[in-house]
Amino acid sequence: MIREVFSSIMGEGKYIGKRFIFIRFKKCPLNCIYCDEPNTSKGVPQFEYISGSGIIEEIPDLAEKLVENIEKIKTPDLFAVSFTGGEPLVYSKYIQKYAKELREKGYKTFLESNGMFPEAVKDADYYDYASIDIKLPEHFDKTNKVIEWEELYNKELETIANLYKNGTEVYAKVVIFEDTSNELIEKIARDISKIGNITLCIQPITPIEGLNIKPPAQKKIFEIMELCGKYVDVMFTPQIHKWMNML
C-alpha cells in the first residue's frame, strides 16, 4: 500500500516551497505518459529518517506504525502531511483513518489526487488542503486508455466540488505541453470558476529523457495565464524539486 515516507520541500502547486511530510502510496489506475512513479504494488515500504540524506530504511510494517514514524521526522517548519501517489484515493478508507489520527495530533493534512474517485471525498471533511490534477487528452497513450477523457474530466470537477463543499482548501493543477490547446485550458479555468474561488496552477511538463515531449514556450505560458486570469486565480509553478534533485 505505502511505497515511501519522507520529509521534503513541496516542489509544485500552490504551496511550492513549503515543508511537507510525504506519504506516497503505490499504484494508480491511470497511465500518464509523463509519470515518473513505478505503477506497481511490489516493494517493501521505505522511510528516510534524515531529509536529503538519501539513507533509506525498509520498514515492512510501516503502514501499521505510520503515525508513530511520522512523529520521528516532524520538524518545526512542517506545513502539512501529504497523501500522494500513485493515486492515494485507491486506499481512501485507510487514508481516512490516518488523516483523522494525524489531525487529532495537530497535523494539517493534504491530499494530492488525480480526482477520478469523487465518491471517495464526498463526505471527507478531514483534508485541510487538496491538489487535484486535471488531466488532458495528450497525457495518455492513445493505445492504452483506461477511461475516456470526458468522463475523467467530469469526475475531476466533481472531486473538486466535493472537497470545496467540505471546506477543504482545494486547488487544481494542470500539466501543459508545447502543443496543449489554449482554448481547452481556458475552458478548464471557466469550469473551475463555476465551482468556487479556486486557484489553477499551470505546470509546464518537465523534460523527461527518452520521451519526445516538449514544454511550452514562454509566449504560450503567458497566453494561457492571461486567458485563465479572466476566470480564476492562476499561478505558474514548475517542478522545483526536480531542478533541486530532491525527493
Image (cartoon, helix red, strand yellow):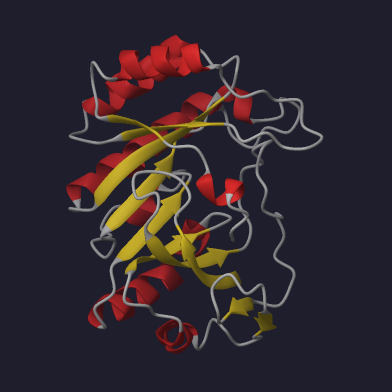
Q: Position of residue 129 (x, y in %)?
A: 29, 55
Q: Position of residue 147 (x, y in %)?
A: 59, 34
**Residue 2 visible in the snapshot:** no
- Which quadrant of the rendered structure holds the C terminus? bottom right
Q: Is residue 30 above or below residue 10?
A: above
Judge from the rendering whether residue 73 lies leftward or rightward of residue 141; answer left or right: left
At 52% from the left and 87% from the top, the residue drawn is: 64
Picture quadrant where residue 231 is located: top left
At 71% from the left and 55% from the top, the residue drawn is: 38
Residue reaching furthest to the right: 210
**Residue 135 visible in the snapshot:** yes
Q: Is residue 49 above or below residue 167?
A: below
Q: Is residue 55 above or below residue 244?
A: below
Q: 245 or 107, which lies in front?
A: 245
Q: Position of residue 159 (x, y in %)?
A: 35, 43
At 24% from the left and 78% from the top, the residue drawn is: 106
Q: Position of residue 242 (x, y in %)?
A: 60, 48
- Which quadrant of the rendered structure holds the N terminus? bottom right
Judge from the rendering whether residue 197 lies leftward or rightward of residue 160; answer left or right: left
